[in-house]
Amino acid sequence: MKNYRAELTGVFGDPVDGNPTGVTMEAAFADKGLNYRYLTLKVLPEDLEAAVKALSVLHMRGINLTMPHKIKVIPLLQELSRAAEIIGAVNTVVLREDGSLFGENTDGKGFVQALANRGISLEHKRVTLLGAGGAAKAVAVECALAGAVSITIINRTLERARELVDTLKKHTRAEASCEKWEGCHRIPEHTDILINGTSIGLHPDGNQKPDIDYAGITPGMIAADVVFNPADTLFLKEAEKQGAEAVNGLGMLACQAALNFKLWTGVEPSLKVMEDTLRKEFITV
Ligand code: NDP
């Protein structure tokens, strides 16, 4: 019998209209000949529980969660990955064969994978991270789980950085410390990997860059950005001028989408298809 039913995935968020993930996921499904759909769905905070229940009612494969649902979804799930539990946020839910819901956080895993794709390992590395928000937390936890020996967090709001240090100390083996971001901040000399985990430089503020002493960036250092639009941020351009190797946030975004794809379909997608479609979307915004 011919199958007219597509497998359903998607994203719940509010606001969600400007989320481009559907374009890249649908392109990757088509590329692999999979009859899957990715739906961009507006779900209000008060309707999250009903929407999550609908996953099994509609026999969906799973769902992505964006703001404001990443934390509130946790009590609605039966099992979490270790990283999602430590980070305290879920961006991907998988509906399993037995009907249970599994929560994963692929934000930070996408970051680590993007570095690995460039041949860069976190093992024994000393990381300096600008920012302590949601993306920075996911990146810090995964860097620590991937073997980073130390993580220094520099954040404008010291309290937020302290909380992240506590989380890292409690759940990982990495040494963790923090500094309050004031003025033109000096980068710790021992830094191997410098990460912009803030939203500074994000479109439409592409002319902005983190206020740090760029002269402290040395050749051989890795500079990575979580900001993906534009991909070639001022932060990365300045770091490259100092001789650092730049890793952009587009790779991280594509890698986490690829991890979600694999979780739902069991198939490895084409990272190139995902990155190319994302790049096209961002050129037009
Ligand atoms: P949050 O609002 O949770 O955190 C923002 C962080 O940026 C905080 O640490 C905040 O500091 C800091 N910050 C913002 N503006 C300034 C400023 N002017 N000076 C100093 N610090 C500043 O945001 P998210 O963590 O959710 O998102 C951050 C970025 O990550 C966004 O650009 C987002 O698009 C990107 N992202 C990328 C992903 C990818 O796959 N590439 C995945 C997820 C997010 P403070 O605590 O003091 O307010």
Image (cartoon, rainbow, N blue to C red):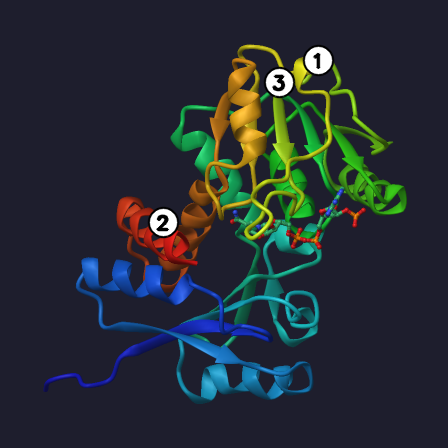
Return the x and y of residue 188 as percentages of the image width and height. 75, 18
Q: Secondary structure at mark 3?
A: loop
Earlier residue among tags 1 and 2: 1
Cα separation between marks 1 and 2: 34 Å
Q: Is residue 170 above or below residue 245?
A: below
Q: Quadrant of residue 77?
A: bottom right
- Regarding residue 205, the answer to whether it shows in the image is yes
- Regarding residue 122, the answer to whether it shows in the image is no
Cα separation between marks 3 and 2: 28 Å
Is ligand 1 closer than 8 angstroms to the Cβ of mark 3?
Answer: no
Return the x and y of residue 212 as percentages of the image width and height. 73, 26
Residue indicated by mark 3:
192
Q: Amino acid at mark 2?
A: Arg
From the viewer's perspective, tell me whether residue 123 is left or right of residue 88.
left
Furthest residue in direction front, as rendered: 207
Which dot marks residue 279? 2
Asked whether the residues under the numbered discs 1 and 2 touch, taking CB atoms below 8 Å apart as contact, a structural biologist would say: no
Of residues 234 and 110, the one nearer the viewer is 234
Q: Secondary structure at mark 2?
A: helix
Q: Quadrant of residue 140?
A: top right
Residue indicated by mark 1:
190
Q: How dense is the environment of label 3, judged by Cα within 10 Å: few (below 14), some, or many (20 and up)?
A: many
